[in-house]
Amino acid sequence: MSANSTAGTPAAGVSISLAELRENQPRFQGFVGGHRACVGCGQALAARLVTEAAGPDVAVANATGCLEVFSTAWPDSAWRVPWLHSLFENAGAIASGMEAAFKARGQSTKVLAFAGDGGTFDIGFQSLSGMIERNHNVLYVCYDNEAYMNTGVQRSSSTPHAAATTTSPAGRDRLGKRHMKKDILQIVAAHHMPYAATASVAYPSDLRKKVRRAMEIEGSTFLLVHSPCPLGWRHDGAKSIEVARLAVTTGLVPIIELERGALTGSMPIREQRPVIEYLRAQGRFQHLFADTAEAREELEHIQALADYNIERYGLRGSGNDARDTEGADTVRRGGVRWA
Amino acid sequence: MKQYPRGGIAEPGASLAYHTGSWRVQRPVHVHQAAPCHHACPAGEDAQAYLALVEQGAMQAAWEALVSANPLPAITGRVCPHPCESGCNRGQYDEPVSIHGIERVLGDEAIRNNWAYPVSAPAADAPTVAVIGAGPAGLSCAWHLLRRGLRVVVFESETEPGGICATAIPEYRLPAKVVSAECGRLLALDGIEFQPGQQLGRDVSLHDLKQQYAAVFIGAGAQQARPWNIDGVTPVDLHDGLAVLKEWTRVGQVPPAARVAVIGGGNTAVDLCRVFKRAGASQVMLVTHSGMPGPGVPDAMRALPRELEQAQEEGVEILAHRGVRRLVLRGEKVAGLETVHMKKLPDANGRLRRVAFEGTESLIHVDMVVPATGQDVDGTGFEELLNGQTYLSANAEGATGADRVFAGGDVTGQAGTVAAAVGQGRRAAAAIARALGKTAETPRRSEAVVAFSALNTEYFEAGKRHHGSSLPVAERGIEREVEQGLGLSEARAEAGRCLSCGNCLACDNCYTLCPDTAVLKTRAEAADGSHYVFDYEYCKGCGLCANECPTGYIQMVPEL
């Protein structure tokens, strides 16, 4: 297809072809390349990481959204696990039905439900709530890129305060979205469910651990994965991890675990970064750097939101910790970190 | 293509048929770059390469990688001013890696375990090269000639090998048994013949050597005291610094004195001060034009900061930025010095010159003054090559201009450190081998040096440098080594602090973070030394891998 085809030729220093090498990777690949996500897509990375960690014995119900669209441009599919497209509003319901069917057939296959923030926070919320209320054995993963990116960057109830989208533009009267980001994690956890957690693509080893933890739990579990969208957030695709990391180290995206609604785990912040570092890296917040009293006030407002999160979840680190924001992404020779 | 009902089903992983690589406007590539430690090492050691092996516990392989450049690591690990550590990028993060500490451990382990030098014996009819001087330059040259399949005969005027390392570095800093063990192991290699007690110009002549051997390498060092006076005045009881150190090393005595001033800012001067202290002098002062080493000091002393620190702990007074204005003589013997504060400052044209500050003159009472301001070459036996010059001139590859005569080390006036002498010996050996048609090696092209800014330090964890212990002042004496060095496990942990600048450390970042699964992990090491290959069929060129590569090993280049 492309002029520089190398699929059949041996890789440098490797005696087998790239195609063969691809089939001999040390990790399970439930989600492969050739999908149509934008360059540097955080959601594609998140889906890859979740699927890798979940392993082969799964079946996926995928709500409408970017992930569904870019991974299955007919007749191609990037999935190597059973995968079903539901509608925008019913990933929770479809996953519930799949789980019930597996149960009836005596199969232990774990059902995963994938949806974006639109399909979770807004449109698919009631079916998600029902699924958890009935405690179906489903891991529901919400890939949170904080707007309806698939349809052209419209605000969702996950869009953070002051972010500009096409339906919450920055202008004379408003500095981006007027309302706050919905605290979906607390709402979901209020179902008295066994496990609900946040994670970020910037901390893949933490994300993998949480997926494995959720896989072991018999019952409804929920994972909210913060996934940058270079197109909608307006940053270079190369910076997706950098931006996601800043979201965590500023305190704007707390990395926490809730069990039966109670806080049981958190990633401490060793060195809190000022929110302007995070905001400046993204086009959707550029209007906050205008030289006006309103813009300055909004910057302070967002800093206060970050500080509030840190206080609320006790995220301030005390001494160096291998699991804090600096320790959790330390590399080791030979890749031990990811094992 | 298989026909499916529209909107129906798709084969698993069928998207691999769609090559998103065609979207790309830039591609990631692996670029091997020189780590700053490698770039800074005068001996040419690639510290980054052997630190990686140490971290993995492959100590012998690490030593072999190390001696491929420098055959004397137990010596340099103790006495080198380690410019590698000044260059180390980790210095801009927390503290530089203790490269010299690890080098020393490797050298000592090789001696302790008698690891075989990685070389095979040369052919019986291989050309033989004469090496004059078994100091660092000569030994390095001999080793690198042997590695290139040549035979070597080493002539040494002293009875023991090691050159200045054996004759003029005190035991507490460099034990004689380390020098003799390391040099001895090298000289015992099949293909090297050692002829001690043979001095050029007395026992052998350059003319005969040129007749007898395929080439000659002169590594005779700089052994002659440099004339020293203040305004033409020299005390009759003047002792030259190097001679005093040699006497101390040989017989354990120095000329008796209660109050001593040593003039100079190098390691020899500091060694002298510490030796006089050990010999019982009540007051020892080091007087130097240069400043104390530290950040932002352009004219810092050449002595190792750690040695200076220890000298001060032992009671040596350092008079930095000080010049000697006048000798105070009682009769013809020295009774004191008049010193003045000085500094190197730029003049109107920006040229640095020394300025003495009026009103800062002060008298210090001493009964001995020892200059340690450098040595000149003793040209006995190669006078015609020296041609009245202070040093034997040689180009970067050691060629002297004379047919088949090469030179390296202090004799050329370009070395100044053991490591530099080792580097010159190595380069000369390469040039000799080339001249004898022995190898077709082309000099390695110089690689760009990885800047600190090219690293992604988010992926590293701050960690304290392992210093190793040093003897408490009360326990320091004439023989016991002050620096105790690193233990094996400390050395491994310290090697783990290496940031692996410009080289893949197989951290899996690129492999883990690619949204398009366009980075594949290889089972064995790939040809470029990494563990990954890019699958350009799917790489969209987002640059995430390059941005998140901790070592700067991945770079984005535009697609043409």
Image (tube, rainbow, N blue to C red):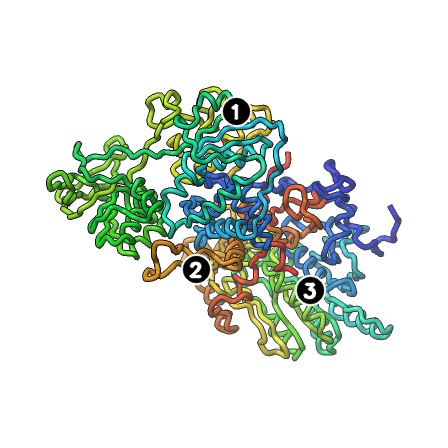
Whether A311 is drawn above or below B133: the answer is below
In contact (CB < 8 Å): disc 2 and disc 1: no
> Is there one chain holding both mark 3 and mark 2?
yes
- The image shows residue A31 at horizontal and vertical percentages of 74, 56
Whether B301 is drawn above or below A293: the answer is above
Between marks 3 and 1, how big is the CA–CA gap?
A: 85 Å
| SS for dot 3 | helix
Q: Residue at x 15, y 39 (%)?
A: B326
Between marks 2 and 1, how big is the CA–CA gap?
A: 86 Å
Q: Nearer the viewer, mark 3 or mark 2?
A: 3
Label 1: chain? B
Q: Which residue is mark 3?
A: A119
Quarter of the image that includes the N terminus of chain A: top right
Sequence-wise, which precedes: disc 3 or disc 2?
3
Label 3: chain? A
Q: Residues within 10 Å of mark 2 (few under 14, many from 20)?
A: some
| SS for dot 2 | helix
Q: Describe residue A56's horizontal placement relative to residue B427 as left or right.
A: right
- The image shows residue B84 at horizontal and vertical percentages of 45, 45
Disc 2 residue type (three-letter): Glu
> Is there one chain holding both mark 2 and mark 1?
no
Disc 3 residue type (three-letter): Gly
State the image quarter where residue B19 is shown.
top right
Whether B159 is drawn above or below A291: the answer is above
Q: Nearer the viewer, residue A154 or B406?
A: B406
Q: Which residue is mark 2?
A: A294
Asked whether the viewer can see residue B300, the reply is no
What label sits on residue B213 in the rendered view? Answer: 1
| SS for dot 1 | loop
Whether B446 is drawn above or below B19: the answer is above
